[in-house]
């Protein structure tokens, strides 16, 4: 891609742009590679075989210094997929499927590979909907033992729990130094519909996790993660509009 020259988008993305988005010559469009590069321009020609765009600008968007990772417990009724879809639109940087003790849904054998691919498809579609330059990665599924290892290595791991005492904002502000922030990851851990078992809470906290309260009401598994992403993004300053 070069500024001032035409770029031709082909394949399924081109067909989607033309047949679903119904882009026509003259319309503005952004094209991203999912790894931070964004091209902005105007459509020159459109057909199901290809979308020709004149490149007006080209930019590379850096990853945030502090990355938000949603650890989403597998949940019934596609509530886990709803959670990662919404969290992606709101700015999550990565997703980890968690096979918790109380998860009714189980990823085993061939189903595990198909389910992981489905999650990546959901996240990719949500990133396109939100016009994000970065597509969040869906990391390999973990059980509680593996999650405990990730907690130990993380900069901060927060279990969203209804019995917690400290609000999530207080936990985040106490742990994240906005003036001297080092590259790190913050794990936001959400349990299934039945909640995180006391044994799991004890095990994860023993590896360094902390519990935090989202609010006065008990949120569903599909809601807690996205709500935490919004609050964490505000604390990190991601929702601040940069000066021109």
Image (cartoon, rainbow, N blue to C red):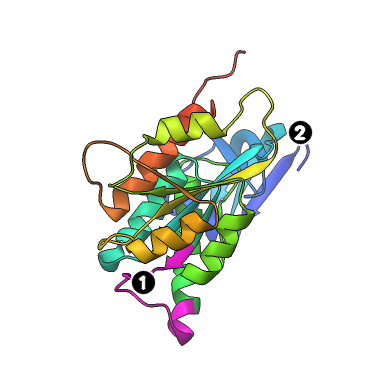
Label 1 and label 2: CA atoms lie apart by 52 Å
Of residues 28 and 209, which is closer to you in this image?
209
Residue 3 numbered tag: 2
Q: Residues within 10 Å of mark 1 (few under 14, many from 20)?
A: some
Residue at image position (33%, 40%) is 213
Stretch of the chain drawn in magenta: 97-112
Name the residue nearer the viewer: 184 or 107. Answer: 184
Q: Is residue 78 magenta?
A: no
- The label number, if any, that marks residue 101 in the structure image: 1
In the rendering, which numbered label is found on residue 239? none
Mark nearer the N terminus (1 vs 2): 2
Q: Is residue 22 visible?
A: no
Q: Position of residue 111 (x, y in %)?
A: 43, 81
Q: Secondary structure at mark 2?
A: loop
- Nearest the viewer among 96 and 22 is 96
140 left or right of 7 in image:
left
The x and y percentages for residue 115 are 44, 73
How many numbered circles are shown? 2
The answer to whether 103 appears left or right of 41 in the picture is: left
Q: Position of residue 239 (x, y in %)?
A: 49, 26
Residue shown at the point (63%, 37%) measured from the top left: 64
Q: Residue at x 44, y 83 (%)?
A: 108
């Amino acid at each position: 891609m070069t500024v001032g020259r035409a770029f031709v988008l082909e394949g399924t993305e081109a067909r989607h742009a033309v047949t679903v988005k119904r882009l026509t010559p003259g319309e503005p469009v952004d094209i991203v590679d999912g790894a931070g590069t964004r091209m902005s321009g105007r459509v020159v020609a459109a057909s199901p075989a290809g979308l020709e765009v004149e490149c007006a600008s080209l930019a590379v968007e850096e990853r945030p210094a502090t990355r938000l990772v949603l650890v989403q417990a597998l949940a019934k009724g596609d509530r886990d997929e709803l959670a990662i879809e919404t969290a992606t639109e709101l700015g999550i940087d990565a997703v980890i499927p968690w096979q918790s003790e109380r998860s009714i849904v189980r990823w085993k054998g061939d189903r595990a590979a198909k389910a992981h691919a489905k999650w990546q498809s959901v996240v990719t579609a949500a990133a396109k909907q939100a016009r994000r330059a970065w597509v969040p990665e869906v990391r390999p599924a973990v059980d509680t033992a593996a999650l405990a290892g990730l907690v130990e290595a993380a900069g901060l791991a927060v279990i969203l729990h209804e019995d917690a005492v400290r609000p999530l904002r207080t936990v985040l502000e106490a742990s994240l130094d906005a003036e001297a922030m080092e590259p790190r990851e913050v794990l936001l851990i959400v349990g299934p519909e039945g909640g995180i078992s006391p044994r799991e809470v004890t095990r994860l906290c023993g590896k360094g996790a902390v519990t935090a309260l989202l609010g006065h009401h008990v949120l569903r598994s599909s809601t807690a993660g996205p709500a935490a992403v919004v609050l964490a993004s505000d604390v990190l300053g991601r929702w601040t509009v940069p000066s021109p």
